[in-house]
Image (cartoon, rainbow, N blue to C red):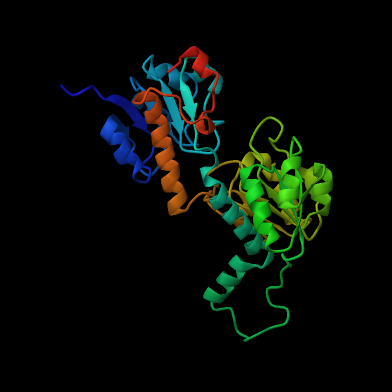
Amino acid sequence: MSKKKSKVYVTRRILEPALSILSTECKVTLNKTPRPPSREEILKNVAGKAGILCMLTDTIDAEVIDKAGSNLKVISSYSTGFEHIDIREATARGIYVTYTADILAEATADLAFGLILACARNIVSADGYTKNKKWKTAWSPDLMLGYNIHGSTLGIIGLGRIGAAVARRARGFNMKVLYHNRKRNQSLESELRVTYVELDELLAKSDFVSIHTTLNSDSHQLIDKIKLRLMKKTAFLINTARGQVVKEVDLVRTLKRNQIAGAGLDVFETEPLPRSNPLLKLKNVVLLPHIGSATYQTRSKMAEVAARNLLDVLIEKKEPNPKFLVNPQVKNVRPL
């Protein structure tokens, strides 16, 4: 007699081999549409499930956990953040919460540096200028003037894995790198050749400010009009972390007044970006649709890790890899 498969809910189609791995071991309920499931769909589909594989866009709170019932043992998030999950509630009920940790660090660092290049050298504007057949003179001394990256100063807010990866890339451009963390990381300073400074000094001295902090009570709307006023008029703000770290209304006002040179944004306070958002009308911004980790290799690896995190708990009955486990305290509530 074949063993009864654990039931799991996957809130979005993810790259292989993850779904095949899950389907072999579990009975999978999959949201096959490209859009995120509605609140009602989540509440309906989690009922009776032993595991949930969710995205950053899915709110997994006490109500959802209640609806899943006592069978729920693991919530595996396909993300590097977990603020969308009620960790305290999950832990109290003995539910393991996992995430994909640093899998996306290098891909996101690539994109952050791509935004630095795009902003400083007008790459997006120049592409549109050429494709729209506005290029009339073979070469002009003042066409699409931008700013040097090589030899400039980069300020990194949050020297975690992504921030450190950006710092390593900056070395190839002979950039001076400043950083600010809640806790100074002296062990990395000599390796990366970076200098710790207070946030206000970083903002005042940097030609490029790249945000890589996690979203928490301290970082929420950390960059507001007061902080933006400290930046150079020739400086650029780059954000590939979380949209809520920047007070968007203040950034819009700053960009409209040309108080800084521009911004490169992959994340926003509201996603997708509403059509009424004034950022869409500004010429001194590069806007991307939250694609920091969007490479075939990274997204496939994230999916595999998310699937195996779920299976470790449900099938192997073992603790997930510690670097992927959000709530290690859960082991005291429900040891495996």
Q: Is residue 225 left or right of residue 103?
A: right
* Front one among 75 and 84: 75
Residue at the farthest left position = 1
- The number of numbered discs placed on residues in the rendered structure image is 0
Residue 75 drawn at (x, y percent):
44, 27
Above or below 36: residue 239: below
Residue at the farthest bottom position = 138
Residue drawn at 40 percent across, 41 percent down: 304
Residue 310 drawn at (x, y percent):
40, 30
Determine which quarter of the picture holds residue 323: top right
Residue drawn at 71 percent across, 50 percent down: 191
Residue drawn at 35 percent across, 41 percent down: 18
Above or below 36: residue 45: above
Q: Is residue 161 left or right of residue 43?
A: right
Above or below 84: residue 235: below
* Front one among 49 and 281: 49
Q: Quadrant of the N terminus?
A: top left
Q: Is residue 156 left or right of residue 305?
A: right
Is residue 37 at all visible to an observer of this figure? no
Residue 115 drawn at (x, y percent):
62, 58
Residue drawn at 26 percent across, 25 percent down: 5
Is residue 188 at all visible to an observer of this figure? yes
Q: Is residue 327 left or right of residue 118?
A: left
Residue 152 drawn at (x, y percent):
77, 62
Q: Quadrant of the C terminus?
A: top left
Determine which quarter of the picture holds residue 87: top right
Above or below 192: residue 145: below
